[in-house]
Image (spheres, rainbow, N blue to C red):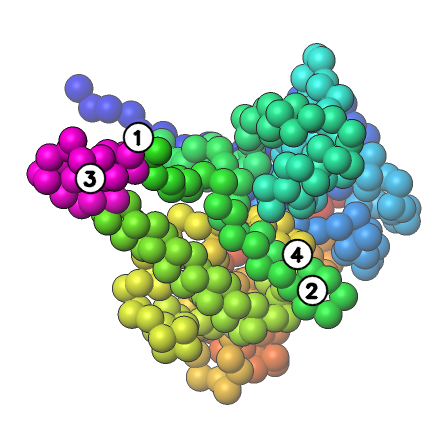
C-alpha cells in the first residue's frame, strides 16, 4: 500500500487558515494577509506598525483609502489572538504578555516581572527585582519558573521538525543597546553550577579515609573543574563570535533591515576570533540571540554570498529583500512576472537568472504574477 505524504503546514498556512474564518472587511482582510506574511518562523512580526503603514500607503495598498496606524494596530491585535498563542508579537516581552493575558487567571507578580523587569531576569538579578517589587527573592524565583514555561518562539512548532525541535528556553545571548554601544549578555541560567560538597572536603581532610578514596574524590573534582573551564571557554568564544557579528553586521543591528546583511562565512569569523572553523560552526549551532529587532538563530547572520557578475557585496537575504520590495511596490493590476523583475534588478547591477528570482520569490512565499493580480471590481 502506497503511503500518502503531505507537505507539512507552515506557520503562515496556519495563520491564513484562521484568517479565512474571520469576518473582516475586504480592506482589513488584505492588510491582515500582508501582516501575516511579515511574521517570521519564530512567530514574530518583523515590521513595526509605522513601517507597515508606509509600505501599504505607497500607492499599492488595498483600495484608495489612506491607511492609518490605528487600523494596523487593530489588525495586529486581532492576529495576536490567533493560535499559536503569542504569535504576531514585536518582541519577546510582548510575546510573553500575550500568553499571560490568554490565561484565565493572570499571576500579577509574573505579569509585572515580564512587563518591567525582563532584562533583570535575563541577567538573573533576582535580589534586584525583589527589592524593586518589595517582595522576597523566593517569590521572584517561583515567578521566574512560571515565565520559563512560556514559549518565547511560538512559531517554531511549524518551522522545525519533531526530531530537531528544541525545548522552550530563553535565548542563549541577549543584546541590550545603550546610547553608544551594545552589551552582550550570555544567559547562563540553564548551565550547571559547580560547588564541592562539604562532605567530600571533610573526607579529604580526614585521617580515616583511605588513600584510594581520596584519590577518587580528587579525580572527580578535577573532572568537574575541567568541565567548568570548558563551559567558561565556550562562553568566551560565544561572546567573541557575537562581538564579531555586531561589528560586521552592524547595519542590520542598527536598523533591523535584512537587506543590510553582508555575506559572512564561518572561515572569516574563525580567522578574526582565532578559533578553528569547526569550533565556530559547533558553537553557533542551535544558539539563539535576542536583539532589539527580534530573536534570531545565531547562524542566521552567516549569509552566503550571491554568485553573480557584479562588484556589489550582496547576500542572498539582501537580494530577497530587493525582490520583496519590487513586488510590494508593483501595480497590482499589472503585476511583474519574474523576467521583468530580473530586468529591474539588472538596472541596480544585480545580475541573477530568472529561475533564481523564481526560487527566492517562492522562499518568500509570494505567489507568481498571475495569482497576484487584483480582481476586477
Which of the numbered marks, if any, corresponds to residue 310?
none
Q: Residue furthest front?
A: 207
**Label at residue 217:** 3
Q: Nearer the viewer, residue 104 or 138?
A: 138
Per the image, label 1 sits on a secondary structure element best described as helix
Label 3 – label 1 distance at C-alpha: 11 Å
Q: Who comes first in sequence, dot 2 or dot 1?
A: 1
The residue positioned 18% from the left and 45% from the top of the image is 219
Q: Residues within 10 Å of mark 4 (few under 14, many from 20)?
A: some
Q: Which residue is mark 1?
A: 199
- Where is residue 69 shown, x and y percent of the image? 87, 46
Q: CA distance from mark 2 to mark 1?
A: 55 Å
The numbered mark, 1 or 4, whose residue comes first in the sequence reads 4
Which residue position is annotated with label 2? Answer: 255
Q: CA distance from mark 1 to mark 4?
A: 42 Å
Please identify the quadrant where the C terminus is shown: top right
Front residue of 261 and 371: 261
Question: Looking at the image, do the residues carrying marks 3 and 1 touch, with CB atoms under 8 Å apart?
Answer: no
Q: Considering depth in this image, is 250 or 276 the residue closer to the camera?
A: 276
**Mark 3–mark 2 CB contact (< 8 Å):** no
- How dense is the environment of label 2, judged by Cα within 10 Å: few (below 14), some, or many (20 and up)? few
Q: Main secondary structure of the magenta part?
A: helix
Q: Quadrant of residue 4?
A: top left
Residue with the mark numbered 4: 176
User: In the figure, 4 relative to 127: above or below?
Assistant: above
Query: To which quarter of the image does residue 340 belong?
Result: bottom right
Contact between labelled residues 2 and 4, with CB atoms less than 8 Å apart: no
- Disc 2 vs disc 1: which is toward the camera? 1
Residues shaded magenta = 200-221
Q: Which one is in front, 102 or 246?
A: 246
Amino acid at each position: 500500500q502506497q503511503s500518502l505524504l503531505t507537505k507539512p503546514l507552515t506557520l503562515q498556512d496556519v495563520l491564513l487558515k484562521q484568517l479565512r474564518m474571520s469576518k473582516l472587511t475586504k480592506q482589513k482582510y488584505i492588510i491582515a494577509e500582508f501582516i501575516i506574511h511579515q511574521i517570521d518562523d519564530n512567530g514574530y512580526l518583523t515590521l513595526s506598525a509605522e513601517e507597515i503603514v508606509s509600505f501599504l500607503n505607497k500607492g499599492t495598498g488595498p483600495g484608495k483609502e489612506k491607511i492609518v496606524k490605528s487600523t494596523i494596530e487593530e489588525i495586529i491585535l486581532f492576529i495576536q489572538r490567533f493560535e499559536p498563542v503569542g504569535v504576531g508579537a514585536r518582541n519577546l516581552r510582548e510575546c510573553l504578555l500575550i500568553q499571560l493575558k490568554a490565561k484565565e487567571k493572570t499571576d500579577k507578580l509574573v505579569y509585572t516581572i515580564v512587563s518591567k523587569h525582563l532584562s533583570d531576569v535575563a541577567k538573573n538579578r533576582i535580589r534586584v527585582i525583589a527589592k524593586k517589587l518589595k517582595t522576597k527573592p523566593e517569590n521572584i524565583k517561583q515567578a521566574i519558573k512560571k515565565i520559563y514555561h512560556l514559549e518565547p518562539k511560538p512559531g517554531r512548532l511549524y518551522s522545525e521538525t519533531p526530531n530537531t525541535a528544541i525545548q522552550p528556553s530563553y535565548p542563549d545571548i541577549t543584546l541590550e543597546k545603550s546610547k553608544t554601544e551594545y552589551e552582550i549578555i550570555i544567559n547562563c541560567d540553564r548551565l550547571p553550577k559547580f560547588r564541592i560538597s562539604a562532605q567530600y572536603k571533610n573526607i579529604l581532610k580526614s585521617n580515616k579515609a583511605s588513600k584510594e578514596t581520596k584519590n577518587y574524590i580528587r579525580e572527580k573534582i578535577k573532572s568537574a573543574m575541567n568541565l567548568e573551564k570548558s563551559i567558561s571557554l565556550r562562553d568566551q568564544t560565544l561572546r567573541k563570535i557575537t562581538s564579531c557579528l555586531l561589528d560586521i553586521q552592524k547595519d542590520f543591528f542598527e536598523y533591523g533591515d535584512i537587506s543590510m546583511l553582508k555575506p559572512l562565512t564561518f572561515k572569516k569569523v574563525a580567522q578574526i576570533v582565532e578559533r578553528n572553523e569547526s569550533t565556530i560552526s559547533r558553537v553557533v549551532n542551535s544558539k539563539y540571540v535576542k536583539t532589539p529587532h527580534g530573536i534570531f538563530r545565531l547562524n542566521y547572520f552567516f549569509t552566503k554570498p550571491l554568485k553573480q557578475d557584479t562588484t556589489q557585496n550582496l547576500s542572498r537575504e539582501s537580494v530577497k529583500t530587493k525582490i520583496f520590495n519590487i513586488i510590494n511596490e508593483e501595480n497590482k493590476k499589472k503585476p511583474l512576472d519574474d523576467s521583468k523583475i530580473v530586468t529591474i534588478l539588472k538596472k541596480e547591477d544585480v545580475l541573477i537568472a530568472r529561475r533564481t528570482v523564481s526560487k527566492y520569490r517562492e522562499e518568500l512565499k509570494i505567489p507568481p504574477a498571475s495569482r497576484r493580480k487584483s480582481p476586477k471590481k
